[in-house]
Amino acid sequence: MTAIVFTGPTLPTAEAAALLPATILPPARQGDIWRAVHEHRPVVIALIDGVFLHDPAVWHREILWALTEGVHVFGAASMGALRAAELAPFGMQGVGKVFEAYRDGIWPGFAEPFEDDDEVAVIHAPAELAHKPLSDAMVDLRDTLRAAADAGLLTAPEALAITTQLKALPFGERSIARLVALAADTLDQATTTNLRAWLPHGTVARKRLDALALLDKLRQFLADRPAPFAAPFRFEYSQAWHDFVTAGDALALDETLVLEEARLRTDDWHDTARAALGRLCAIAAAPEPRSDDARLALDRFRLARGLTRRADLDAWLAGNAATAEWLRRAVRDEAGISASLTLPPPGLDNAIIDHLRLTCRFAELLQRARAKHAKLAERPAPEPGPLLDAALGWYAERSNWDGSTPAPFGWTDEAAFRLAVWREYTFVRAQA
């Protein structure tokens, strides 16, 4: 069963891989959890480390989305503990002391509220140097000073005084070495000497301990072969989420390979690229679709492809290397484009005529339209009743219009649509 673990400075990649059969990824950035679900379809995601200073941090909504996709999401130690505390009511599971402190708002042994994200922040080396930490987290320093007090090396007030001084520093300047320097300024020489001698074996790596506890829990969790997570909430597909997904939608391997094949087919590529460009412009100009519009767009999508059963839809998605999330996004875009056609922008009719001429379809349509016009010039317009209803039913059987709307998309005048259908029906029957 696939597991994804995001880690770095808290627990080295090689060590994590040795402790749990999983795909080990570097500290998570915004969009990484969304991409991990798309690319790996994991059973569980474990978030330990995440970036936050120079890159956008993991977004809460992508974790919520992963939960609604049936993925179990755990967090511990660092960024994972923060997000787990924030999203525990929605089903993200936290492990360890850091998570519990963020959840409860208090670090054991200290009176002040525990809520700052800098408590777990460190600076670290780049990936080429295995994300080696270059500072120590405040939570590690807190637990180390508490352990020193418990061991009789410091009094509780002395430990608190040094903790307060460390907390006042920028997170990148906090370290065991700085702790010793502050102790030398605060304590007598004998106490400082004893503390310095104790630290090599007494330092508490709290974040590391929590990360190890998380991996241990995941081993047990995966051994039970869990069912997909059942989210206790409904994920809202907002415009902000649509923009986020679109911006971070890097091509998967299958999509990259297909794009290469398409580019090699020079006869089709130009038309494909032009159509895609037009689609992009239409999506950008489209209004926000209503939920009813999106459901109708999904029905049209399935009907046009004969995907009446869920099994047929799943097979189509698998054959096109597409996910349910892709389908939701594509249908949403289609609904927006269709909504645009109900109130077409100025110049659309002229642009369609240009397109028909450029694609060599205008002359064929013109020839048929002239023949129909000549044949029906003396025919009166139909009155509402059984004959017109029969014509509309005839048209529905031969097109993708199912009669659920007054007219198909592309028609802004219902009366004009009904007249056009009557004319087509009469013309075809006259030729039979």
Image: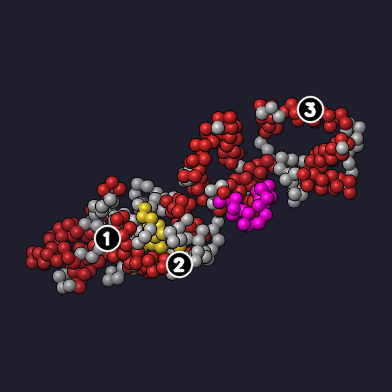
Q: Residues within 10 Å of mark 3 (few under 14, many from 20)?
A: few
Residue 238 seen anywhere in this rendered image of the structure:
no
| Secondary structure predominantly adopted by residues drawn in magenta | helix
CB-based contact (under 8 Å), mark 2 and mark 3: no
Find numbered disc 3 in the image and state the secondary structure of the residue it sits on: helix
Return the residue found at the far left. Answer: 190
Instruction: Give the extent of the magenta segment.
Output: 299-318
Indicate which disc, 2 or 1, sits on the residue closer to the N terminus: 1
Hey, which quadrant is residue 4 in on the image? bottom left
Q: Amino acid at mark 1?
A: Met
Tell us which disc is closer to us: 3 or 1. 3
189 vs 195, nearest the viewer: 195
Q: Which residue is mark 3?
A: 367
* Front: mark 2 or 1: 2
What is the three-letter code of the residue carrying label 3? Answer: Gln
Quarter of the image where the C terminus is located: top right
Q: Earlier in the sequence, mark 2 or mark 3?
A: 2
The residue to which callout 1 is attached is 138
Question: What residue is rendered at 88% in x and 33% in y?
Answer: 376
What is the distance, in whole Å, between disc 3 and disc 1 at their CAs?
80 Å
According to the picture, the residue beneath numbered tag 2 turns out to be: 225
Q: Residue at x 22, y 69 (%)?
A: 146
How far apart, in angstroms, are the residues tagged by discs 2 and 1? 36 Å
Label 1 neighbour load within 10 Å: few <14, some 14-19, many 20+: many
Q: CA distance from mark 2 to mark 3?
A: 65 Å
Q: Position of residue 390 (x, y in %)?
A: 85, 47
- 128, 281: nearer the viewer: 128
